[in-house]
Image (spheres, helix red, strand yellow):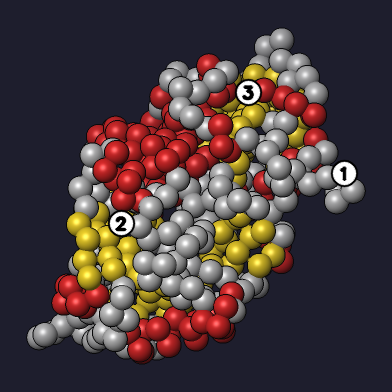
Amino acid sequence: MGYQYDTIVIGGGPVGLASGYQCAKAGKSVLLLERFNFFNQSGSSNDLVRMFRTMYTQDFMANLAFQSIREWHDLETDAGQALIWMSGLLNFGDPNYQSGPEGNLTSPIKNLERLGLPYKELNAAQIMQQYPFQKLPSNFIGVFAPTNGCINVPLLLRSLYRLAQSYGAKLLAHAPVKDFKLSEDGVSVSFDNGEYQTVTASRCIITPGAYINDILNCIGVQIDLNIWEMVYEYYATDPGPGGALFPSMWFQFLDPTGGDPAKSNLFYGFPAVPWGPPNLARIAVDNAVNVITNPADRKIVPAANDLQITADFVANHCVGVDNRPNYAGTCLQTNVTDNMYVLDFLPPSVGAGYKNAAVFTAGWAMKLVPLIGKILAELVIDGATTYDISQFKITRKGILRSSEQL
């Protein structure tokens, strides 16, 4: 059978654009469908900045982060632009903190040493001397690693868009998918961008993030998602003299106050980045009280609880930083039961042709975007990937909803 395209990509966020770019660069004909405008604020790539980090508790995640450094370099070379500002990352907090969505404080050290990545340890006094923090508990420790940095999200998205187009990919906005079908040797996708169309391809990459169940529902599959409405805020910092400067990204590890998840103490921050407003630092909580299962139920307005606990942290522990945010917003953080990715072919239960489509959703993915795009391209072009993605199977326990839940 003759197909109109080698690959159709559904979802034009960073992972979809990276996948389309890799496929087109490999000489494949590519159609990429985005339901909204490109570079929109309706998913998980809102705002200006995300973390690239190599500090991971899990060996397999540390390995992928380390391997992604080369993919980031290759992408920056192809784009002719630096996409990461390598300012480093300070993890600090209670050394007895056990585990959360970002692992724990000290376990990444073994992986840094194994991979030959530099780091240094700090005590509470040194942290407060080098960063505008105050009143940290005396037992706090820190781990600083320089091979971590701030991702320029707007530039990353636009670079991937430009490169995908330059290699021949066709990119369509306002093209929501209405139907998706598998056959033994290909796929068909119907969409409506003002005109209802059905197109065919030998392979498909499905990357619409929080909206993935809208696509999988066409073939009777649903992923059990918990979608966090993550709140981010920007706080004004003292411009000097004697100003307040966060020299790098940072993350605090500390159990919630009184054991109440709504009173999380997992705070993080970014320095004022060169591509953002001067003297504004992003500071937020790595948690969400607004949790939904369908992105259509998004509240959009930042949760008052998440704003308040972050403002309280700033008031109590930051020096030279206004304790009321200048502005705030939300983005969708798509999660599954183990806080990891879903990166795999479709499940065999969908029948013949399940390997004609590769899927990605969930987890904190921005830091690995070039690598995930390459993996998805390998899956649909070669039928396998050279990278270890065994931890991200779609068939692992707790990922797919049972027939009773559908």
Residue at x 28%, y 68% (from the top left corner): 141
Residue at x 20%, y 48% (from the top left corner): 118
Give the amino acid type for the residue marked by disc 3 in the picture: Arg
- Residue matched to label 1: 403
Helix, strand or loop status at disc 3: strand
In this picture, is 224 found above or below 263?
above
Give the foreground label among 2 and 3: 2
| Label 1 Cα neighbours within 10 Å, binned few <14 / some 14-19 / many ≥20 | few
- Residue matched to label 3: 203
Quadrant assignment, res 94: bottom left
Image x and y of residue 317, in percent: 32, 84
- Residue matched to label 2: 150
Give the amino acid type for the residue marked by disc 1 in the picture: Ser
| Label 3 Cα neighbours within 10 Å, binned few <14 / some 14-19 / many ≥20 | many
Quarter in which the N terminus is drawn: top right
Helix, strand or loop status at disc 1: loop
Give the farthest residue toward the top: 1
